[in-house]
Amino acid sequence: MRRFSFLNHAADLGIIVYGKDKKEIFYNAALGLLNLLYPLIKFTPKINYQFNFEGNSDEDLLISFLNKILYILEVEKIILFKFKFKFKNSDSLFVDARGDKIDSFKIKRDIKAATYHNLKIEKGKIWKTKIIFDV
Amino acid sequence: MNWDKILQRIDKFRFRLPKDYKNGMRVDGLIYANSELMESIKQDQAIEQVANVAFLPGIERLSLAMPDIHWGYGFPVGGVAATRVNDGVISPGGIGYDINCGVRLLRTSLTKKDIKDKITDLVDRLFYDIPCGVGREGRVHIKNNKELAQVLKEGASWSVKHSYGDKDDLEYTEAGGCLEGADPDKISKEAYKRGINQLGTLGAGNHFLEIQEVVEIFDKKSAQKFEIFPGQITILIHTGSRGLGHQVCTDYLVIMGRAIYKYAINLPDRQLACVPIKSQEGEDYLSAMASSANFAWANRQCITHFIRESFEKIFKKSYESLGIRQVYDVAHNIAKMEEYEIEGKKKLLCVHRKGATRAFPAGSLEIPLNYREVGQPVLVPGDMGRYSFILVSASKAKEESFSSACHGAGRLLSRSQARKIIHGRDLQKKLLEQGIYIKSASFSTLAEEAPEAYKDVEDVVDVCEGAGISRKVAKMKPLGVIKG
């Protein structure tokens, strides 16, 4: 199954994310974002981060998670690419993330944030969501 | 969506989106466009977003869209909404992630003949002196968070105090380059971390620095007031509050996403999350937004100083003798408290401008004394291959558009469409053949920002002029461009 595809948006960038469940949606959304951010090269998972997120919905948790990836990239110059998720209903998420130091000059573009615009995680046999990033 | 059946044409330059289009709209939408621009506006979701903005509690009179409107996230880019301070809301999505993204125009006493043999050296020098692109840190050393907090409180005057610029620059900056009410304590430690190394950086995306030649004057009186003349070299800066502003918007959207339940606010798009202006969350956001806006003004002020230094190095003359002075600096992503007369009553409104420029009329006390006879300059960048404009506010702006006008050309192609048909290197070569020398930190960004990806900005400003919300003063063509 395809993990993500790109979406046309007038001013910004978007991805359509697919997965067999919530964990895959979160994982594949991160991979889609990383694809927009950095050249696809082999990384070594050297650095470990752990995060807790809270929100009112899965959508809130997804955006907080993606924005944390953007923050770590900009401030720490670390790309996070391996994740383990522990959900507690739709209002709490624990993420164990691993990543690698990057060369900040190789970052492909400045993505300001993942937005909530028309965001809905569609649940079913195949889970799906569309995410717009502000560029 | 068949918009032809829904939109009502008011005149050559206006379309109404009636509030009965969607249950929950509190006011009509008003879109400034001509027939041709409307055809491209109808292609994406921008009109739907005009309708969604009309849901905001306390919105006054109209959900407005400038002629450069295009699909954004939450608000359309080019959207304007004024909410009543008494019972209305503040929506961070109506300002955007790049708080106080804006433009600053510098004039010089140079003409094209003074610069034509030096343009390559000058652009190379500027590209070297002004950090741009992703991941570049600034040359302005901020010692610690305490010092950054001072920047957030003082805005452009912090930069001037630290020898980045001239006191006169402040007079020619919206709000003097410092919004009142800034409270650095309302900003997260993450936002501090993102901002501390980014002062004096241009950034990436659609941010740029352009050396231009004035090629046409439309309104001699206003041009004289702005000290703009044919053949003159001008410099246009487009940037904002960088990662600090992005983080502030991110943080407050989380806070407001929770608060909409508390205040029982029903919205069609979570990105429009908002709270009453007169609430703790609303006041906190406004203090954080003002701090971010001040960071952006300090940023453009430091860049102004670097530009002057670069010109001094190339021309071996002082910037004073080169006549490098500021025409104006104005935000196009911001919310401001402004007073308007609505049905005979004065009301204090919070005017959200998301990709729209304030356009205060002649006589306004908020604009520089020298300009009060003609009105506020409205700076409208176009694309890197064609031209940009200086406009001035016109009579209809105050009564109809909450003193707002357009902010740019508006996108025609998506970024991925642009990358498919345009190659950055080829574009650089093609523009050089047209006499425009470009340096970019990324060929991919260059392709995304190609002239073909944008509408013709002249069509956009002609609609503003036709609708009577601003008038053309001067047109500038690019000679050299730096892209992030």
Image: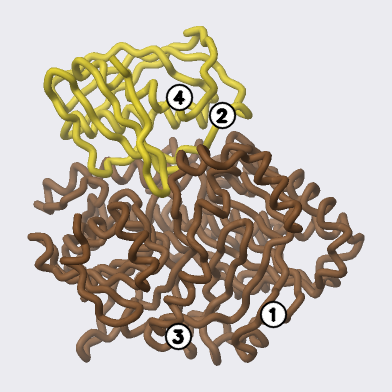
Chain colours: A yellow, B brown
> Of A35 and B277, which appears nearest the observer?
A35
Q: What is the three-letter code of the residue carrying label 2?
A: Ile
Q: Nearer the viewer, mark 4 or mark 1?
A: 4
| Image quadrant where residue B396 sits | bottom left
Both marks 4 and 2 on one chain: yes
Q: Which mark is residue A107?
A: 2
Q: Chain of mark 1?
A: B
C-alpha span from label 3 to label 4: 46 Å
Tell me if B199 is positioned left or right of B336 in this view. Answer: right
Mark 3: give few (<14), some (14-19) or many (20+) Cα within 10 Å.
Answer: many
Q: Nearer the viewer, mark 4 or mark 2?
A: 4
Instruction: Name the secondary structure under disc 1.
Output: loop
What residue is shown at x 75% (from left), y 47% (from top)?
B129
Mark 4, secondary structure of its residue? helix
Query: Could you confirm whether marks 3 and 4 are on the same chain?
Result: no
Task: Return the x and y of residue B392 as percentages of the image width and height.
Answer: 52, 81
* Vertical arrangement, residue B136 with respect to residue B99, above or below: above
Q: Which of the two labelled residues, at mark 4 and mark 2, occupies the earlier sequence position? A: 4
CA–CA distance in space, label 4 to label 1: 46 Å
Task: Give me the chain letter of mark 2.
Answer: A
Q: Which residue is mark 4?
A: A35
Q: Which residue is mark 1?
A: B228
User: Are both tags, 3 and 2, on one chain?
Assistant: no
Residue shown at the point (15%, 52%) measured from the top left: B267
User: Which class describes the residues within 10 Å of circle 1: few (<14), some (14-19), or many (20+)?
Assistant: many
